[in-house]
């Protein structure tokens, strides 16, 4: 894939997003998630079947984490759909992030249609044990 | 209307509502073997002139744990999905959401008569299992010449 097609596609998505922002919103599916937290931060797993890395957009804006993705399943030409449990190939879900998380250090990993996000806590927000001295 | 409503994704709420309604009223009649809608994995079925195409949306399943069989016109997709374990789960680990399916699953699809069980190919990519089943020659559409 060369740079121009990549750029063209980005332009397309931007246009589509603008359109959806103004009048008709695109119908999206809410991906199912698992969310765990430990002392290091939060780990989020999201089911995004049929999504490849280039069709996945994870961003943090104004303390909100957005996950947007498009599923692409290769099917032969001339396919007539007869039964559909997933009707929309667009996934979107948003979460608000507290200030204790370090948005710049979010790690995202996509494997077999499952996205894993690790959202670390800021160092100063990690629980610490404070030694108590007597004397 | 204020954007506060639309910000929470009205349409997926709508979808959820629709699913709840369907579960209340039974929805459309479906195959006795199809199970409840929303079962894992979700399945789309389509056909072309030459084949029947089935897509099972099964993200995060190890292909080794995926079994596919055709018997007496029934396609069975079964397997197991393991739980996503939080990394380095300490005793302070907390769970906030566990919506993703975990465990063994089985879905059965009734194949149409013209499906040829000898012409099957399956492929797992990006969490989607695509099964393509050829149609028997006799069932393919043909133009009939008028004399």
Image: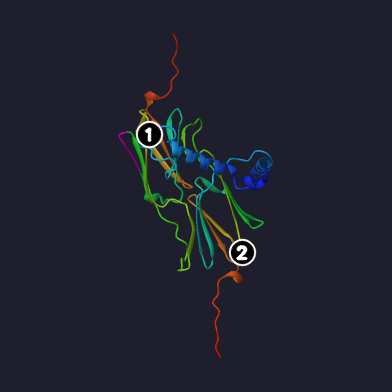
Mark 2 belongs to chain? A
Q: Is residue B132 left or right of residue A23?
A: left
- The magenta region covers B68-72
Do the residues indicated by labels 2 and 1 lie within the same chain of the protein?
Answer: no
The percent position of residue A102, horizontal first and vertical second, equals 61, 64
Q: Which residue occupies the foreground of this view, A34 or B87? A: A34
Q: Residues within 10 Å of mark 2 (few under 14, many from 20)?
A: some
Label drawn at residue B2: none
Which quarter of the picture shows residue A124? bottom right
Q: Is residue A79 left or right of residue B9?
A: left
The percent position of residue B22, horizontal first and vertical second, equals 46, 37
Protein image colouring:
rainbow
Residue sitting farthest toward the left:
B72
The percent position of residue B9, horizontal first and vertical second, equals 59, 45
Which quarter of the picture shows residue A70? top right
SS majority, magenta? strand
Mark 1 belongs to chain? B
Q: Which residue occupies the foreground of this view, A105 or B7? A: B7
Tag 2 near tag 1, CB within 8 Å:
no
Residue at 60 percent of width and 48 percent of height:
B8
- Label 2 residue SS: loop
Residue sitting farthest toward the bottom:
A135
Label drawn at residue B31: 1
Q: CA distance from mark 2 to mark 1?
A: 49 Å
């Amino acid at each position: 894939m060369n740079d121009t097609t990549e750029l063209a596609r980005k332009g397309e998505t931007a246009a589509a997003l603008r359109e959806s922002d103004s009048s008709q919103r695109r119908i999206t599916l809410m991906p199912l998630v698992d969310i765990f937290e430990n002392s290091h931060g939060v780990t989020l797993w999201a089911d995004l079947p049929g999504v490849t890395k280039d069709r996945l957009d994870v961003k943090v804006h104004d303390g909100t984490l957005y996950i947007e993705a498009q599923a692409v399943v290769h099917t032969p030409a001339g396919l007539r759909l007869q039964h559909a449990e997933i009707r929309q190939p667009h996934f979107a879900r948003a979460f608000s992030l507290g200030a204790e998380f370090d948005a710049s250090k979010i790690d995202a990993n996509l494997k077999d249609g499952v996205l894993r996000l690790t959202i670390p806590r800021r160092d100063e927000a990690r629980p610490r044990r404070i030694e108590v001295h007597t004397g | 209307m204020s954007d506060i409503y639309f910000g929470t994704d009205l349409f997926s709420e709508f979808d959820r509502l629709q699913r709840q309604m369907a579960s209340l009223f039974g929805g459309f009649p479906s195959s006795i073997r199809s199970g409840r809608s929303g079962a894992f994995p979700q399945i789309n079925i389509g056909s072309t002139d030459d084949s029947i195409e089935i897509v099972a949306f099964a993200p995060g399943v190890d292909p080794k744990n995926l079994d596919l069989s055709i018997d007496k016109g029934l396609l069975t997709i079964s397997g197991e999905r393991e739980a996503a374990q939080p990394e380095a789960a300490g005793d302070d680990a907390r769970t906030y959401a566990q919506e993703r399916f975990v465990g063994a699953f089985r879905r059965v699809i009734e194949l149409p008569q013209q499906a040829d069980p000898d012409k099957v190919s399956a492929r797992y990519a990006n969490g989607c299992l695509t099964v393509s089943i050829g149609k028997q020659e006799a069932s393919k559409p043909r133009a009939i010449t008028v004399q």
